[in-house]
Image (tube, rainbow, N blue to C red):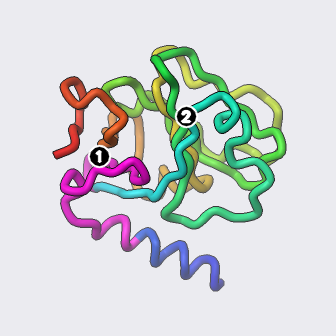
């Protein structure tokens, strides 16, 4: 019950966040979508070793946290859950910051590939089931300073 209460408190904070484009930082993933907006504190995985390690071996992940995988250029991306102990949502994002796919509740320790499609520049991993609960679906938009701001669907201000 304690965990449920902390998740609910985090979700309330996400829903009541002020205008998110005001603070665009490397350690924040800011989303807008029909009916809401959300903010996650993120760790960045932007090289081969960091992307390979990901969230492996972690026993917990705060509800308002995640890991943002960033590639050098858009590409076909596929993930798996080797040595990952938590169910995760994987949010695949194109070079404009638009969510193209959400894979919900990836199973812990499952080595089945999870394809994200072509043209993926970023992938955000968050707690399993959270994307659906707060409304992050394909078409949602990410504001982040590592996107090309001239072409970003939700540019930083």
> Which residue is found at the position 76% from the left and 39% from the top?
81
- Could you say which is closer to the camera, residue 140 or residue 41? 41
- Picture coordinates of residue 112, whole percent (x, y): 79, 29
- Picture coordinates of residue 53, whole percent (x, y): 73, 40
The reply, left or right, for residue 45 in relation to residue 83 is left
> Which residue is found at the position 22% from the left and 24% from the top?
151
> Which residue is found at the position 52% from the left and 59% from the top?
65
Q: Quadrant of residue 114?
A: top right
> Which residue is found at the position 57% from the left and 25% from the top?
116
Q: Which mark is residue 33?
A: 1
Residues tagged 2 and 1 counted as in contact (Cβ below 8 A): no
Callout 1: SS: strand
Sequence order check: which comes first, mark 2 or mark 1? 1
Magenta-colored span: 12-36
On whether residue 4 falls in the magenta region, the answer is no
Residue 102 appears in the figure: no
Q: 108 above or below 116?
A: below
Residue located beneath label 2 in the image: 46
Q: 69 above or below 77?
A: below
Q: Quadrant of residue 50?
A: top right
- Give the crowd class for mark 1: few <14, some 14-19, many >=20 residues within 10 Å: some
- Could you say which is closer to the camera, residue 25 or residue 65? 25
């Amino acid at each position: 019950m304690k965990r449920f209460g902390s998740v609910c408190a985090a979700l309330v904070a996400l829903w009541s966040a002020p205008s998110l484009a005001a603070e665009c930082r490397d350690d924040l993933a800011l989303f807008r979508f029909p009916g809401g907006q959300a903010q996650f504190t993120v760790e960045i995985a932007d090289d081969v070793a960091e992307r390979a390690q990901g969230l492996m071996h972690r026993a917990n992940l705060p509800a308002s946290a995640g890991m943002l995988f960033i590639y050098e250029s858009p590409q076909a991306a596929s993930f798996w859950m080797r040595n990952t102990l938590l169910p995760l949502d994987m949010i695949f994002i194109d070079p404009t910051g638009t969510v193209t796919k959400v894979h919900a509740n990836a199973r812990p320790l499952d080595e089945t590939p999870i394809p994200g499609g072509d043209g993926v520049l970023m992938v955000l991993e968050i707690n399993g089931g959270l994307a659906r609960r707060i409304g992050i679906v394909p078409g949602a938009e990410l504001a982040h300073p590592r996107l090309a701001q001239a072409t970003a669907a939700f540019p930083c201000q």
